[in-house]
Amino acid sequence: MGASGAGREQVDALRGLLARNIAIGSILDRAPELGLPHWYLGAGCIAQTAWNVLSGFPAGRAIEDYDLVYYDATDLSAEAEARRAGQAAELFRDLGVRVDLKNEARVHLWYASRFGYAIAPYRSTEDAIDCWPTTATAVGVRTLGVAAEVYAPFGLDDLLAMIVRPNRRQITEAIYRAKVARWVAAWPALTIVAWDG
C-alpha cells in the first residue's frame, strides 16, 4: 500500500531516505512483536531523518525521540499504556534511542493539562496523524518493505522539499513557532511557511 496523497515515486524516495536510519529500520522490523493495534512509527523521526539525509547529515542526528503510536479504545488507562511503553523500551533498548509510545485513543485525556486546551477524542490513529502539527511531520510508516505502508494525509511534497508548513487543525501558533525555532536551529536549510501564510 502506498501513501494517501503521495505517489509511488515519492514513497520510494522516502523509503530510501529512511533506510539510512538504522533505528527506524529496526523499530519497524520489531514493532509487530508488541502486538499494538493500528500502529505507526511517525512524526518527527520520519521528517527529521529525511531532512538529515537531504542535508548531508548523519541520518539519526538531532532526533529527540521516535514516536510509535497505536490506537486502542478498549483500554484508555495510563497503566495499560505504561505497560506497553515498558515492553517497547525493553524491545528497543539496544538501539540507543528513545521510543515514545502513545495510545492515540487516550490523548484527549491529558492534552489540556499539557497544552492548555481540550481536544475531541481521536477516532483512529489516522485521525490523530491528520492533526499532527505540520504537513511535513504528519506522516506514519509501518514498513519500509517493497510495499511500503505510509499514511501521509498531506502527501509527501513538503517533507521531501524540506518545507515546514503549519497544520492548523489543532495546534496553536505558539506551538508551531516553538517547533520551528528548534527545527531551524538543527536544519537551517528548511523553508518555513509563516503561521498565517
Image (cartoon, rainbow, N blue to C red):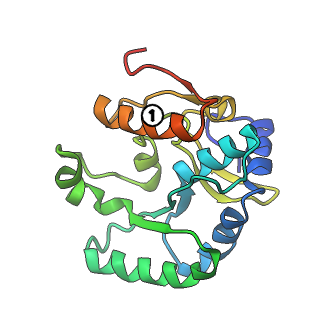
Say above or below: 184 vs 37.
above
Residue 89 seen in render: yes
Q: Amino acid at mark 1?
A: Val
| Local SS, label 1 | helix
- Point 23% across, 45% down: residue: 119
Dot 1 alpha-carbon crowd within 10 angstroms: few under 14, some 14 to 19, many 20 or more: many
Residue 172 seen in render: no
Where, quadrant-wise, is the C terminus in this rendering?
A: top left
Quadrant location of residue 124?
Answer: bottom left
- Point 64% across, 54% down: residue: 61
Quadrant location of residue 47?
Answer: top right
Left or right: residue 183 compared with residue 61:
left
- Quick one: 90 or 140, which is closer to the camera? 90
Q: Which residue is mark 1?
A: 180
Looking at the picture, how far across and down is residue 29, in whole percent? 69, 72
Say above or below: 42 vs 178.
below
Quadrant location of residue 108?
Answer: bottom left
- Quick one: 43 or 55, which is closer to the camera? 55
Left or right: residue 73 compared with residue 149:
left
Say above or below: 168 vs 186.
above
Looking at the picture, how far across and down is residue 193, in whole percent? 49, 21
- Point 37% across, 83% down: residue: 83
Looking at the picture, how far across and down is residue 116, in whole percent? 17, 45
Seen from this angle, which residue lies furthest top?
197
Looking at the picture, how far across and down is residue 63, in whole percent? 56, 55
